Amino acid sequence: MTELKNILVAVDFNDAVGELLGYAEGLAEKFGAKVWVVHVAEPDADFVGMEPGPQYIRDFKAEDLREVHRNLQSICKTFLGEEVEHEALLIQGSTVETVLEEAQKLKSDLLIVGTHKYSFLHNLLQERVSLKLLKKASIPVLTVPIEED
């Protein structure tokens, strides 16, 4: 089996985040790997060619991003033991491309994502982020089924 040194977990703050991090923790303990927990936020208006708007809106968005990052760090502390080296990253951009770029940048050996259980017809009509990551990734991808409420 290939040795794992860096495990990237892409999260979107759903109820399955604990399960995703549980898989990451188990593998990290076995291989002595570092866990990178990544959440991709919407890109800045400047990035997508739109006007950034008034300063108070930019300040509000910046504070919102700081809060999201604090939540991400809190989730790591809740679901990953202290013996597992980990880091929480909040990155802005297009989800699929940003996750794949970050995986390459961090020299990730494994990508862990959650995947929703939808009907065949739904999946056929609307390709999901996890499926796009699975198709485009150059590293192994562990997909964890997420139960729908």
Image (tube, rainbow, N blue to C red):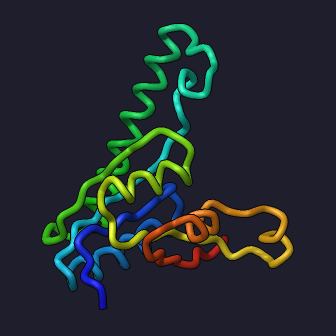
Q: Quadrant of residue 85?
A: bottom left
Q: How many marks?
A: 0
Specify the farthest residue to the bottom. Answer: 1
| Position of residue 23 in the picture relative to residue 141 (left or right) | left
* Percent coordinates x, y for residue 26 in the rendering: 29, 82
**As drawn, 129 above or below 61:** below
Residue at point 21%, 82% (across, down): 31
* Percent coordinates x, y for residue 20 in the rendering: 43, 72
* Percent coordinates x, y for residue 11 in the rendering: 46, 59
Image quadrant for the N terminus?
Answer: bottom left
Residue at point 42%, 69% (across, down): 111
| Position of residue 89 in the picture relative to residue 43 (left or right) | left
Residue at point 56%, 44% (across, down): 94
Q: Quadrant of residue 110?
A: bottom left
Say which of 17 and 51 sits in front. 51
Residue at point 29%, 81% (across, down): 27
**As drawn, 110 above or below 77:** below
**As drawn, 144 above or below 42:** below
| Position of residue 47 in the picture relative to residue 102 (left or right) | right
Specify the farthest residue to the top. Answer: 54
**As drawn, 141 above or below 71:** below
Specify the farthest residue to the left. Answer: 83
* Percent coordinates x, y for residue 3 in the rendering: 25, 82
Image quadrant for the C terminus?
Answer: bottom right
